[in-house]
């Protein structure tokens, strides 16, 4: 009996040990796989995979952005492009936010190396650049048809150019002020484990990359302008970006031609101006980003800050001197006085109803409109001394205001008029007032009902107009040191 | 069972001298008083000589004694030592009495038990008595102050949250530094707060490689072995009912804030300076005119309540003043704790059945935790060669967790420290009168803009929000369901072999239910929002352990071979909808539109082979080798295997014959161990485990409307593998004066090599970090443990325990010269949490400006000294100390006098620094208009010549509240963790009734005293020494009773 038990037990032991061992077969350990991510091999094996990466890049641009390591972003005023745009909107002279999320931008104090704003703009745009570099390299080494390769590369390069242009404008004065001033690091290859940071180079270096990318883009993007969504950069947007860049570089002929090419297929529709600026299918919009109730940055939205009717941050006001530039019959005169009460000297006297917030946070937002292209064309032509510059300006003015009267200005007076028209046309969109002060090297003179403490009078190219390089960059880049810091 | 085990582990021996011819032979039999069974292996010595023997398997012994006066000493681990004068007898039978104190010395170790004497590794033990004296929800907290080398930080006042536990310093930075938790022999995957303290027999802390090597690639941060209670063999049935009821409040009072009147006065002063700065001709009037415009609210109800001279105008009276702390926290949070257990059994079958309920309210309104625990532990010997057992438990908890840390708007603690007293809870009209709704009720003020209004609207602080309203109306519920089924079968076969097969299955459901009401707050625009998460963890572990256990003469050998298979699966599911037609509805069916639905699965598998060989010779020399080979699905097939080995040895000097005459030492033992363990738990930025660290990843879910998208968000290093931790441990254990004083002194050197590091890439590369095994960190320390029985009389017993640990943490290798991360910098030679921040240089008495230090440099850029600057950007950063404490100690005392018992426990920490951002935020000096201020701001600079550390008030972006040494504080503290006083009623009171066995009534106080250098800040913040507006520790006072049947 004892023997039987023993052998029986021995058998159990044997089976137990064997069964356990059999589980060690590689399959058991190889079976777990990532369930919500794909590998670079997956992405670059099909064009649809690359398209998905583009979709991801566009979506990320309008997300509740935070860096991969969580060290920058993650706050309402750092949520992607909207945050970038609002900061610029309030840094000019037309819009005011004495208290609220963007008050430090409004005060031109949000520029120190450790500040959230600075880290966000740097990391957000460089992250985008790296994503585009991944596409450029991935497509290059893929087995796609050559024609597909150039099409995909063109779009990636256009996004990259946009990001570099937005970066250089934050961290250095305009190209025209000094092309040899320190620029920002330029990378055209994706980050790898071995990558090291590069030096600031010069503004010229950065613009060289931007122009080369945009020229590649306009030559190789689909001439039909076809795209999946209006968030995507197509040939019109690429031309529009090129027009902006060339205008800043003072290359008027190129700027004019690019602006004309950019507006191909788009026209002014005056009665769309007052429909809330929250619909991407607006025929005037060349480039914009959609949102939906399940893809939104909630109260971070542009209209949450600019609108005062629907509950949101409701924090941005229009300056009285700016409001006074509009005639009563101008469709763009969407200001309401005394919404909260007060007198014309109170900063909260005027609000604008140009932007309407959707209650479900599904507001789309604009990045580029056809009107800007007419204004670039007019400005370039005025610089070139072409006779119809004033006509183009008036074409826009009369479209917006049936009672508009042609000024007949020429030369500098015409250019000044165009600059004012740019502010009137595009206020609250991408920060035209502030961007033009930088681009044209103008002083910043705040008048009207700006509160006393923020009634600035800064000379052109003031250090306050640009951000400092993030401390984290100086700490982590062996080729940039404290001595490379902006003043 | 205990006898057999000890026979196996502890066959003591003696050296037999050649006996003289005239010696007499004494023989006899040794039995146990517990069950009358013979006891083999008892040490029999002739006192004062080297003559000795041990009893055989039948408990018989023979010994030759030199004379009638000889005294025989009978000793056996776990039994009281007895002495007997021989006289004329030739046969001496002894009944050995169990030594209750020593019996506890059989302790649970990795994959088995060992006598304490046989230990070669470092194991700290926290027993049920120590655990039972603390009013804790999460058992991790029981380790604070009770075990040397263990750092426990409970940085929250939310009941049910687990403390951070660090064993012997910090050995990981970007991988998890949490210890491995093992429940009843199997790795635990639930939430530690699912386990009730009442079901725990002991928590053993495995600190060195010898103790933890059998947990291999998961043991680098130490191991907590939690063992639940089991029944007894004595036949006695015990029914125990425990109940307590108490109340809690913050252990340390909140920071002191300005009252509304002070706030208004100082705001005027700040704006007056603004007027001066912009050159206004009458700054006082400027301030008077702009005061309400800046603050937006006017609690005085009269226009320009403060005049041009900074005085309150006559007739101005405060219409309201809000103390937000009172509105958002509980003054008394109630606690109730009940448990009922049945335990008992006989030789064949033992059982332990437990049921418990605990509820604890939190510091923040609506915060609470409730838990129900049940457990059945059953073991039965079905055949002489077959034993089976099960340990099964179920736990349910329900937690309401209003936000109380981080920078979210909804963080109640941040809210209290943001909203100054001048802002009302309820809406006020232009004149300051309360606005009522149609039913005449006040309406909550969200600080929003309102058309046609300029005063008492548009609050500059956290607009739009009102946490008093939304915290009550919204839900943040977390329910946890945890089931653990653990079954085993033990078979003994051949003569010296046994086999255990153990299968453990865990299922843990985490159910999150967040609700934003449709009437107020975040849910208002979307007509209400509901978010639900159902996350399911399924894990099983199966191990088979083959053991060989054999004694050859004075040699004892025990060898185990184990195979283990582990499978872990976590499924995440989240959905979010908005749009409720009516208030009060909270289910998905009632909500109109989908905002989010997402899900994923994580899986981790391991297969491991383990082995251990223990050997001892004559109870004096011990040696142990342990090894574990792990294969994990977390690493690439090339890097997936790791082998971890340890060796340990000890020498029990007190069992040497040359020691038997030294009465002072009842125990003297030296032990040493060396070995390697690993860490495979790599974490992402949200401290979530990374399951495929070697695969670069494009994350899905980045959809652009309905076009699906992916985004590159993980740059992998495909060579990544485990961190390795090598520990050398040397210790002395001792007992003197018949074990009245026992203790140990340990020294260790614990070095992590190939530390998993997030190496920062240059920010502009667009991808921030890569993980690599590059970097070493070394933790060294000394731990001293002393337990003493100071008085031991019939009616009065007093014992004390003291432990202290000294720790040093040092980075010894880095992949780059320095790694700067926020307020910290790591360099070779620094600790892993070394503050590297601007050094505050005080306030310039001339103009009241804040000053910081910067380096003074000569023409060549060499640093020649330090000068001050008023520009924060220019200030240099300096190394200003470590966040890690270097000394921690605990002291406990237990006293029993007649029916009374009194005990206390003190825990202390010295040397760590904390950067108090929360306090910095309260010293903004009006650069954050409307935000709350600390009373210390009253010491501000006001006029030239003022000597103060608080700068001039300034409405600009003044940087006075930026991080600097001004807010870096010494975080040393001493905390009275627990005091309890009890009275056990004498059985006569119940007429020696058969029903009631015992009754004790008690009062307990936890955390009632804290000595800390800092006010407002609870010293238990986080391990990195930074603060983030979190709720803080409780003190709790409870009454209760223990009733035994």
Image: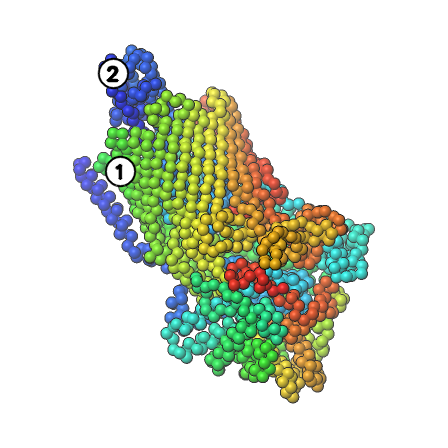
From the viewer's perspective, is B655 left or right of B466?
left
> Is label 2 in a helix, a strand or a loop?
loop
Q: In the image, which disc is placed on residue B20?
A: 2
Instruction: Identify whether B680 is placed above or below B53.
Output: below
> Is label 1 in a helix, a strand or a loop?
strand
Q: CA distance from mark 1 to mark 2?
A: 40 Å
Write the residue at 41% across / 62% down.
B696
Does residue B282 appear in this view?
A: yes
Residue in the foreground of this view, choosing between B145 and B120: B120
Q: Position of residue B949 (x, y in %)?
A: 68, 48
Instruction: Identify whether A116 is placed above or below A266.
Output: above
Residue B90, image quadrant:
top left
Q: Position of residue B536 (x, y in %)?
A: 42, 53
Residue in the foreground of this view, choosing between B349 and B32: B32
- Name of the residue lying farthest toward the top: B88
Write the residue at 38% across / 67% down.
A41
Does residue B411 appear in this view?
A: no
Q: Nearer the viewer, mark 1 or mark 2?
A: 2
Write the residue at 67% across / 73% down.
A442
- Name of the residue lying farthest toward the right: B314
Q: Quadrant of the N terminus of chain B?
A: top left
Q: Earlier in the sequence, mark 1 or mark 2?
A: 2
Q: In the image, which disc is placed on residue B548?
A: 1
From the viewer's perspective, is B768 left or right of A5?
right
From the viewer's perspective, is B436 left or right of B730?
right
- Name of the residue lying farthest toward the bottom: A387
């Amino acid at each position: 009996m004892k023997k039987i038990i023993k052998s029986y037990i021995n058998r159990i032991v044997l089976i137990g040990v064997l069964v356990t061992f059999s589980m060690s077969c590689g399959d058991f350990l190889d079976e777990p796989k990532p369930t919500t991510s794909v590998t670079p091999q997956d992405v670059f094996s099909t064009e649809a995979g690359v398209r998905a990466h583009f979709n991801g890049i566009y979506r990320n641009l309008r997300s509740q952005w935070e860096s991969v390591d969580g060290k920058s972003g993650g706050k309402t005023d750092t949520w992607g492009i909207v945050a970038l745009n609002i900061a610029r909107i309030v840094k000019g002279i037309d819009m005011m936010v004495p208290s609220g999320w963007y008050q430090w931008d409004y005060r031109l104090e949000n520029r120190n190396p450790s500040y959230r704003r600075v880290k966000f703009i740097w990391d957000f745009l460089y992250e985008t650049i790296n994503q585009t570099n991944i596409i450029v390299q991935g497509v290059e080494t893929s087995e796609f048809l050559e024609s597909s390769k150039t099409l995909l590369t063109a779009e990636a390069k256009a996004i990259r150019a946009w990001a570099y242009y937005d970066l250089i404008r934050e961290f250095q004065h305009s190209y025209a002020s000094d092309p040899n001033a320190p620029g920002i690091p330029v990378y055209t290859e994706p980050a790898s484990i071995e990558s090291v940071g590069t030096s600031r180079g010069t503004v010229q270096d950065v613009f060289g990359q931007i122009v080369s990318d945009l020229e590649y883009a306009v030559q190789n993007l689909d001439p039909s302008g076809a795209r999946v969504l209006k968030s995507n950069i197509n040939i019109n947007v690429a031309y529009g970006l090129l027009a902006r860049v060339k205008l800043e570089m003072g290359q008027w002929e190129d700027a004019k031609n690019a602006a004309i090419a950019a507006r191909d297929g788009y026209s002014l529709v005056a009665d769309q101006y007052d429909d809330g600026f929250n619909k991407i299918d607006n025929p005037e919009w060349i480039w914009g980003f959609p949102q939906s109730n399940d893809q939104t940055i909630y109260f971070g939205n542009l209209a949450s800050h600019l609108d005062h009717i629907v509950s949101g941050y409701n924090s941005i006001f229009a300056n009285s001197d700016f409001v006074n530039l509009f005639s009563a019959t101008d469709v763009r005169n969407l200001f309401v006085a005394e919404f909260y009460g007060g007198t014309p000297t109170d900063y909260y006297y005027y609000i604008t109803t140009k932007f309407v917030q959707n209650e479900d946070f599904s507001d789309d937002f604009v990045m580029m409109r056809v009107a800007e292209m007419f204004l670039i064309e007019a400005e370039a032509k005025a610089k070139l001394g072409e006779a119809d510059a004033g006509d183009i300006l008036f074409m826009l003015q009369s479209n917006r205001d049936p009672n508009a009267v042609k000024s007949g200005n020429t030369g500098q007076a015409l250019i000044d008029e165009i600059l004012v028209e740019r502010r009137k046309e595009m206020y609250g969109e991408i920060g035209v007032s502030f961007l033009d002060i930088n681009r044209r090297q103008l002083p910043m003179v705040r008048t009207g009902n700006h509160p006393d403490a923020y009634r600035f009078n800064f000379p052109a190219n003031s250090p306050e107009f640009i951000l400092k390089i993030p401390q984290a960059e100086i700490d982590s880049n062996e080729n940039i040191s404290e001595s490379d810091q902006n003043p | 069972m205990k006898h057999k085990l000890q026979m196996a582990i502890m066959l003591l021996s003696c050296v037999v001298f050649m006996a003289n011819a005239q010696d007499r032979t004494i023989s006899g039999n040794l039995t146990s008083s517990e069950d009358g069974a013979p006891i083999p292996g008892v040490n029999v010595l002739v006192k004062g000589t080297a003559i000795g023997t041990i009893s055989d398997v039948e408990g018989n012994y023979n010994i030759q004694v030199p004379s009638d006066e000889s005294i025989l000493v009978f000793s056996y681990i776990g039994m009281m030592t007895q002495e007997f004068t021989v006289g004329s007898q030739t046969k001496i039978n002894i009944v050995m009495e169990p030594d209750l104190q020593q019996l506890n010395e059989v302790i649970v170790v990795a994959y088995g038990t060992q006598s304490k004497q046989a230990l070669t590794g470092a194991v700290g033990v926290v027993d049920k008595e120590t655990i039972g004296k603390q009013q804790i929800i999460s058992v991790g907290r029981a380790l604070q102050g009770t075990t040397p080398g263990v750092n426990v930080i409970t940085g929250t006042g939310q009941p049910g949250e687990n403390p951070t536990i660090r064993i012997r310093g910090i050995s990981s930075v970007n991988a998890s530094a949490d210890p491995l938790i093992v429940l009843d022999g199997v790795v635990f995957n639930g939430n530690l707060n699912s386990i009730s303290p009442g079901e725990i027999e002991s928590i053993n802390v495995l600190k060195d490689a010898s103790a933890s090597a059998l947990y291999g690639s998961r043991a680098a941060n130490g191991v907590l072995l939690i063992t639940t209670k089991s029944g007894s063999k004595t036949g006695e049935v015990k029914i125990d009912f425990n109940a307590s009821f108490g109340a809690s409040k913050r252990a340390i009072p909140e920071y002191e804030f300005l009252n509304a009147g002070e706030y208004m006065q100082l705001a005027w002063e700040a704006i007056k300076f603004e007027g001066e700065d912009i050159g206004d001709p009458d700054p006082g009037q400027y301030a008077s005119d702009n005061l309400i415009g800046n603050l937006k609210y006017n609690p005085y109800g009269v226009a320009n309540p403060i005049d041009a001279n900074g005085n309150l105008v006559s007739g101005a009276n405060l219409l309201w003043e809000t103390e937000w702390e009172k509105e958002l926290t509980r003054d008394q949070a109630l606690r109730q704790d009940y448990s009922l257990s049945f335990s008992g059994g006989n030789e064949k079958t033992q059982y332990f059945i437990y049921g418990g309920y605990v509820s604890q309210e939190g510091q923040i309104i609506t915060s609470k935790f409730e838990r129900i625990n049940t457990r059945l532990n059953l073991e039965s010997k079905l055949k002489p060669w077959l034993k089976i057992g099960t340990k099964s438990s179920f736990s349910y908890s329900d937690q309401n967790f209003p936000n109380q840390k981080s920078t979210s708007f909804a963080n109640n603690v941040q809210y209290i420290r943001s909203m100054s007293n001048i802002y009302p809870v309820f809406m006020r009209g232009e004149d300051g009168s309360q606005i009522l709704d149609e039913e005449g009720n006040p309406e909550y003020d969200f600080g929003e803009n309102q058309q046609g209004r300029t005063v008492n609207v548009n609050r500059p602080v956290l607009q739009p929000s009102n946490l008093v309203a939304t915290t009550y109306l919204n839900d943040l519920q977390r329910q946890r369901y945890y089931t653990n089924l653990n079954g085993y079968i033990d078979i003994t076969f051949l003569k010296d072999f046994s086999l255990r097969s153990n299968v453990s299955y865990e299922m843990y459901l985490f159910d999150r239910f967040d609700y934003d009401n449709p009437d107020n707050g975040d849910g208002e625009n979307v007509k209400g929002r509901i978010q639900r998460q159902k996350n399911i963890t399924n894990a099983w572990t199966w191990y088979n352990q083959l053991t060989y256990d054999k004694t050859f003469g004075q040699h004892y050998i025990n060898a185990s071979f184990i195979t283990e298979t582990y499978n872990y699966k976590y499924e995440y599911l989240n959905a979010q909808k908005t749009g409720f037609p009516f208030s009060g509805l909270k289910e998905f069916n009632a909500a109109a539109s989908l905002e989010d639905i997402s899900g994923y699965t994580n899986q981790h598998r391991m297969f491991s082979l383990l082995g251990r060989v223990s050997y001892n010779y004559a109870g004096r020399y011990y040696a142990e080798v342990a090894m574990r080979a792990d294969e994990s699905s977390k690493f690439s097939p090339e890097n997936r295997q790791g082998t971890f080995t340890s060796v340990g040895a000890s020498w029990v000097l007190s069992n040497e014959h040359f020691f038997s005459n030294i009465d002072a030492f009842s125990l003297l033992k030296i032990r040493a161990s060396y070995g390697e363990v690993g860490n495979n738990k790599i974490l992402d930025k949200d401290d979530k485990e990374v399951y495929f660290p070697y695969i670069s990843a494009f994350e899905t879910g980045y959809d652009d409307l309905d076009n699906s998208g992916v985004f590159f968000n993980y740059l992998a290093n495909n060579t990544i593998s485990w961190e390795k931790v090598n520990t050398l441990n040397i210790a002395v254990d001792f007992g003197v004066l018949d074990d009245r004083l026992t203790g140990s002194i340990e020294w260790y050197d614990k070095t992590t090599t190939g530390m998993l590091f997030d190496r920062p890439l240059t920010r502009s590369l667009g991808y921030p970090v890569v993980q690599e095994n590059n970097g070493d960190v070394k933790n060294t320390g000394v731990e001293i443990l002393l337990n003493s029985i100071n008085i031991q009389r019939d009616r009065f017993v007093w014992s004390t325990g003291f432990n202290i640990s000294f720790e040093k943490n040092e980075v010894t290798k880095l992949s780059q010269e320095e790694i700067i991360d926020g307020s910290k910098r790591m360099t070779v030679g620094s600790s892993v949490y070394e503050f590297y921040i601007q050094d505050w240089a005080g306030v310039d008495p001339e103009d009241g400006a804040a000053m910081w230090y910067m380096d003074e440099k000569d023409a060549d850029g060499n640093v020649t000294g330090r000068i001050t600057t008023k520009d924060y950007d220019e200030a240099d950063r300096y190394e200003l100390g470590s966040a890690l404490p270097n000394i921690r100690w605990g002291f406990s005392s237990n006293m029993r006098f007649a029916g009374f018992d009194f005990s206390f426990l003190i825990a202390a920490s010295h040397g760590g620094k904390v950067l108090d951002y929360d306090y910095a935020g309260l010293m903004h000096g009006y650069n954050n208009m409307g935000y709350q201020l600390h009373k210390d701001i009253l010491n501000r600079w006001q006029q030239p010549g003022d000597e103060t550390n608080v700068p001039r008030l300034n409405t600009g972006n003044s940087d006075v509240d930026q991080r600097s040494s001004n807010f870096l504080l010494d975080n040393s503290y001493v905390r009275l963790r627990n005091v309890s006083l009890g009275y056990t009623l004498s059985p006569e009171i119940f007429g020696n009734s058969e029903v009631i066995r015992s009754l004790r009534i008690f009062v307990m106080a936890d955390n009632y005293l804290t000595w800390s250098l800092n006010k407002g800040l609870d010293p238990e913040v986080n391990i990195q020494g930074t603060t983030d507006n979190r709720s803080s520790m409780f003190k709790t006072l409870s009454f209760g009773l223990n009733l035994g049947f």
